[in-house]
């Protein structure tokens, strides 16, 4: 869950007026906060072919977004 929280905060911050003031309008790293919430809700009910919860894949993706690993 820590990567979900980090991604959500990153998504909110990238869209904050102070961020835009400091960094201008450059490409954003994170999906919108609404997209992150929807992805999490969808992941909670999904199971992959290996029987892992959808949150497993989402966790991996958000970890990559957050720390690049």
Image: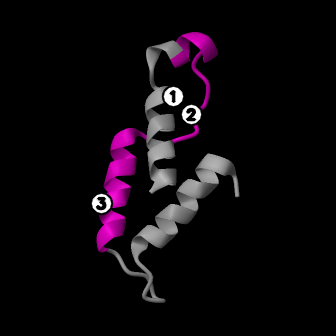
Dot 1 or dot 3, earlier in sequence: 1
- Single out the residue that lies furthest toward the top: 21
Question: Is 55 located above or below residue 47 in the figure?
Answer: above
The image position of residue 14, as x and y in percent, is: 51, 28
Q: Residue at x 59, y 56 (%)?
A: 63
Dot 1: element? helix
25 or 6: nearer the eye? 6
Magenta stretch secondary structure, dominant: helix
Q: Residue at x 39, y 49 (%)?
A: 36
Mark 2 to mark 1 CA distance (whole Å): 7 Å
Question: Does the magenta run of residues contain 4?
Answer: no
Question: Is 5 located above or below residue 42 in the figure?
Answer: above
Quarter-of-image position of residue 45: bottom left
Q: Residue at label 1?
A: 14
Q: Are marks 2 and 3 in contact (CB under 8 Å)?
A: no
Colour setting: one colour
Dot 2 or dot 3, earlier in sequence: 2
Question: Does the magenta run of residues contain 40?
Answer: yes
Q: Are marks 2 and 1 in contact (CB under 8 Å)?
A: yes
Q: Residue at label 2?
A: 28
Of the numbered discs in the image, which one, if any, rests on residue 41?
Answer: 3
Dot 3: element? helix
Which quadrant is home to the C terminus?
A: bottom right
The residue range painted magenta reads: 19-45
């Amino acid at each position: 869950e820590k990567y979900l929280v980090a991604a959500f905060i990153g998504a909110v911050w990238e869209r904050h007026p102070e961020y835009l003031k400091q960094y201008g309008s450059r490409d954003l790293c994170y999906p919108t906060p609404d997209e992150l919430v929807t992805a999490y809700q969808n992941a909670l009910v999904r199971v992959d072919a290996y029987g892992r919860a959808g949150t497993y894949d989402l966790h991996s993706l958000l970890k990559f977004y957050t720390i690049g690993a």
